[in-house]
Amino acid sequence: MTGRPFAILTVCEGNISRSPAAQFLLAAALGKCFTVESAGVAADGVAGRPVDRWTRSYLSKRGVNSSAHGARQLNGALIGNAELILTMTLDQRAWVVAEVPRALRRTFTIREFARLALAVRGQNPNSLSDMVRRAAASRAVYPVAPGGSDEIADPAGGLPADYEAAFEMIDRAVALIVPELTRYERLRAPAGARPHAGFVL
């Protein structure tokens, strides 16, 4: 058993809406066995900016304080330190892998990982890292359903309904992912940490 928390990184474009929403929701639901950070593939121009007002309002309604957030640009160091990377789109997933090719097997869109984590449960992974590896190996076995999508579109510049739709998709993905991650957290528990039950979103 290792005392190092399992590191998760969420990724979007500017790191002011979708990826911090996913970050804060995951962090609120997961225990001390996890760290959750976020960054954007095109955040240079908005570095340090807080979450946008729609994201702040959404998280506030969920009892989550996002005031400490400052947007930051994704880089190789952040990718290299993460054990699970969750993007919002396939293009962002491709950006991550182009930057750090060895990250391919631990990089998914958030909806893709939610789907695959459920699919590999019956394989009885023996750790968090094993579950991530099995999910990556199962991409071709469990493709997205015809007419379905593994992406969450950028609501920036859209209507309030576009933000609500994006947040609802993030919400559903987090609700599926959290139980699958916490299933294995006891194998990564820091010394003296109590098991964490998480919550259903």
Image (spheres, rainbow, N blue to C red):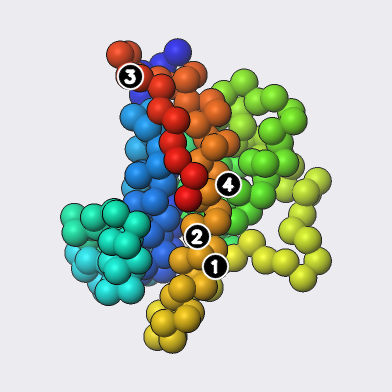
Q: Nearer the viewer, residue 165 or 129?
A: 165
Residue beneath label 3, please?
193
Front in this rendered view, residue 112 or 172? 172
Q: Residue at x 46, y 73 (%)?
A: 164
- Neighbours of disc 3 within 10 Å: few (<14), some (14-19), many (20+): few
Left/right of residue 188 with respect to residue 103 in the rendered view: left
- Taking the spot 72% from the left edge, 41% from the top edge, the residue there is 119
Q: Which residue is mark 4?
A: 176
- Residue 152 disc label: 1
Kindly identify the residue that appears in the image at 50 percent across and 41 percent down: 178
Q: Is label 1 or label 2 in front?
A: 2
Q: Earlier in the sequence, mark 3 or mark 2?
A: 2
- Residue 34 position (above or below residue 65): above
> Within 10 Å of the Cα at label 1, are there few (<14), some (14-19), or many (20+) other Cα atoms?
many
Circle 1: residue type: Ile
Residue at which label 2 appears? 170
CB contact under 8 Å: marks 4 and 2: no
Characterize the local packing of mark 2: few (<14), some (14-19) or many (20 or more) Cα atoms within 10 angstroms.
Answer: many
